[in-house]
Image (tube, rainbow, N blue to C red):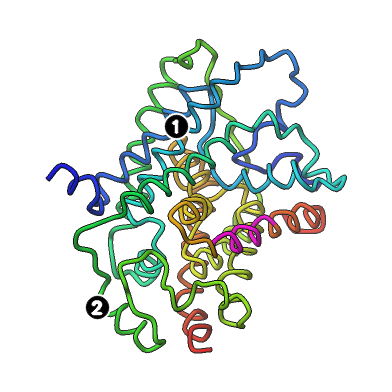
Amino acid sequence: MSLPSNTDFEVESPDISADTTAKKAPWWRQLQYLAAGIIFGIILIRSEVISWFRIQEMFRLQSFHMYGVIGSAVLIGIIPVAIIKKTGAKTFYGEPITFHPRSFNKGQIFGGLLFGFGWALTGACPGPLFAQIGAGFTVTLATLASSILGTWVYGLLRDKLPH
Amino acid sequence: MFMNILTSPWPWYVAGPLIGLMVPLLLLLGNRSFGISSNLRHICAACLPGKIPFFSYDWKRESWNLFFAGGIVIGGLIAGTLLPNTGPSSIHPQLAAEMAGYGVTYAHAPLPAELFNWPALFTLKGFLLMIAGGFLVGFGTRYAGGCTSGHAIMGLSTLQWPSLVATCCFMAGGFIMANLVLPFILHL
């Protein structure tokens, strides 16, 4: 079985790169994402999601906090997504909102386990890595650099890995 | 009083729904999918594509996410450095006791300074926690096709069952590492 061209749940470009007719959004719209990121960063800090100790509690079943955060985030995410799908709502700028269903592959198991190992070691998934750096933990720059290297090595070995 | 509310740690039922609202916010702002780990791929594509097919795409089309990640750094600066968390915060007594056995104490900081510092990078323990751990985060998230935000929150919000598989495996990996392997590393 050949490897599907896009196994990524987050990156859309490989799917749509052929589409060059899409209008280029004005540069200032990037600032909205900057603002959204600032809000998200503040939430991550205040909720202690970036805490190595909270992650350790989660994986020892010693606290409900992280389960509550992730669980309620999903529940609150499901409702507007369903409304958008049902009503065919468009973006604030009138563009259609599209969803890209992905298919199952073994990467979700093997990669998921490997990420889980890393999550318990570093106490941080990718969002908190960025937030920790902002919060003054400069040594997280080393962790982030290593995670970029890990991504690069995955890209290099991708065709040889079971998917 | 108002400042106290803003700077004390937020309970899960405040933080979780706010994080969930990131999903429709990004969709409505420009049809964007919530997911942080793909930034690591974009950084590779921008800095060191090396003719690797996985990094040969127009990363500039996804640059919104790099702005989002930059925003997280600024948000961390605002809430972590300028107006840091105040108020009560404690960890489970069992965890505190276990950590005391490794010489690690909870000092109300997100990261234990005994383990996460620059000189520690050159010790076996620090190398395993930060460098090996970081490598696994980057390698594993891309292999899985997403991370906690891309799979657990965006993927589950859009009811994609492969994201449920991934999320269960994140948790399984974390349980194995935290309970079976990490104790040996922390004893080093």
Task: Kindly identify which residue carries mark 2.
Answer: B93
Residue at the image position 73 percent from the left and 56 percent from the top: A154
Residue at the image position 66 percent from the left and 58 percent from the top: B139
A43 shown above or below A92:
below
Q: Which residues are magenta?
A: A140-148
Q: Nearer the viewer, residue A77 or B43?
A: B43
**Residue B81 locus on image (x, y percent):** 38, 53
Which residue is at the far left? B1
B50 shown above or below A87:
below
> Residue A140 occupies which quadrant of the picture?
bottom right
Three-letter amino acid code at the position of disc 1: Ala
Task: Kindly identify which residue carries mark 1.
Answer: A35
Q: Is residue A104 left or right of residue A134?
A: right
* Other-residue count near label 1 (Cα within 10 Å), few / some / many at <14 / 14–19 / ≥20: some
Q: Is residue A64 left or right of residue B149?
A: left
A90 shown above or below B16:
above
Q: CA distance from mark 2 to mark 1?
A: 38 Å
Residue at the image position 54 percent from the left and 21 percent from the top: A29
* Other-residue count near label 2 (Cα within 10 Å), few / some / many at <14 / 14–19 / ≥20: few
**Residue A98 locus on image (x, y percent):** 56, 23
Three-letter amino acid code at the position of disc 2: Pro
Query: Which chain hosts label 2?
Result: B
Residue at the image position 80 percent from the left and 57 percent from the top: A157
Query: Does the magenta segment cover residue A147?
Result: yes
Q: Is residue A41 left or right of residue A162?
A: left
B147 shown above or below A124:
above
Which residue is at the far right? B51
Which residue is at the far front? B82
